[in-house]
Image (cartoon, coloured by chain):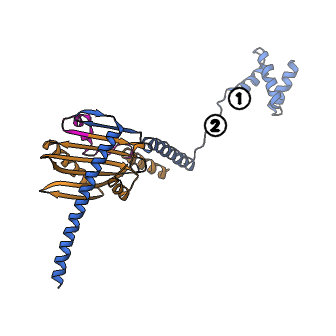
Chain colours: A orange, B blue
Amino acid sequence: MRRATILIIILLSVLPKVLSQENLNIAPFFSSEFFEKNGVSTLTVTGDNLKNTGIATYRSLTVTGNDEGSDQLSQAVKHDGAKAQTREVSYRDGKLYFGFYVLKPRAALNRYLLYLDRNESGERKTTLIYLEGKGDTNKIKKFLNKKDL
Amino acid sequence: MQNETYELIERYFNAETSLEEERKLRKLLAAIPSGDPLANEAKAVMGFSLCAPRKKRMLRITRRTRAWLSTAAAIAIVFTLGFFASNHYGNTPDMIYAYVNGHEITDNNEVMQMMQAELSEMAEASEYVSECIDEEWNAMREAFDQTQQ
């Protein structure tokens, strides 16, 4: 009886975390309020469109010519990156230039963040990519370097 | 008929009646009007036995049974939630779209090209960061070698 009760308590304490999307600081940037703004573009590709890549969800966000938006995005990425399992980051002039973060898996799916902050034709351009799927880090790196999908 | 009744009553009090005879006696007693002392006595005894509260059939649930039931319930919950979770997360629905400056793009090829472009930029940045790390590492190694000489 006691064992069963403990099992139920564990399930009740763990399942909400599994079933509800773990709140990432970057999540609000993928809401329509943000991505419908000027200078912002977003991509969403899921399911069969990513067949054999080890990725189930591809979401990206690019902010162009909007320093405030880019700074906010950078802050959110740094916060989420701080909780990442592994990270490869590079800073330029005190600013986050590139980041590759392996987040904690959710519902048996691996999650990755890729971030890039650069200047293009005199404009600041920040791109964030969120990947979710069963592929491991090697598979993701192969996907990154794939020329034809 | 009355003789038969008395005979059955006597046999009943002597605990010699069969179940069928008792049923018959009940019917016979029902037909006898009140006033007959022997019949009344028999009615009272039989009436008591008819009206006496039946022993409740208690479903005996031992601790062990309860523990098994709880475990079974917990397993059922896990399977139900597992089924829900696998349906919810296992099959990502096919989606492909983009928003650029608030305008929706639904052309699959265009979206895939945009994704490709983003990945290429990320790959370049990743390579650049790797090269920087290599350069730094080489510089460190050279410096280390010099101190060893």
Q: Secondary structure at mark 2?
A: loop
Q: Which residues are magenta?
A: A18-41
How many labels sit on residues? 2
Residue B38's image quarter? top right
- Between residues A1 and B18, which one lies in front from this camera angle? A1
Note whether residue A28 is visible. Answer: no
Q: Position of residue A54 (x, y in %)?
A: 40, 51
- Between residues A12 and A20, which one lies in front from this camera angle? A20
Q: Is residue A127 above or below residue B57?
A: below
Location of the C terminus of chain B (image quadrant): bottom left
Q: Is residue B42 above or below residue A22?
A: above
Residue A99's image quarter? bottom left
Q: Label 1 neighbourhood size at 10 Å, few (<14), some (14-19), many (20+)?
A: few
For disc 1, the marked residue is B49
Query: On what subunit does the disc labeled 1 rest?
Result: B
Q: Which numbered circle lies on residue B57?
A: 2
- Between residues B116 and B81, which one lies in front from this camera angle? B116
Q: Label 2 neighbourhood size at 10 Å, few (<14), some (14-19), many (20+)?
A: few
- Between residues B43 and B41, which one lies in front from this camera angle? B43
Q: Residue at x 40, y 48 (%)?
A: A107
Location of the N terminus of chain B (image quadrant): top right
Query: On what subunit does the disc labeled 2 rest?
Result: B
Q: Secondary structure at mark 1?
A: helix
Confirm whether the magenta stretch covers residue B97: no
**Marks 1 and 2, how far apart at CA:** 17 Å
Note whether residue B33 is visible. Answer: yes
**Direction from residue B22 to residue A112 in the image, left or right:** left
**What amino acid is labelled 1 in the image?**
Ser
**Direction from residue B32 to residue A148 in the image, left or right:** left
**What amino acid is labelled 2 in the image?**
Arg
Confirm whether the magenta stretch covers residue A26: yes
Q: Residue at x 80, y 27 (%)?
A: B22
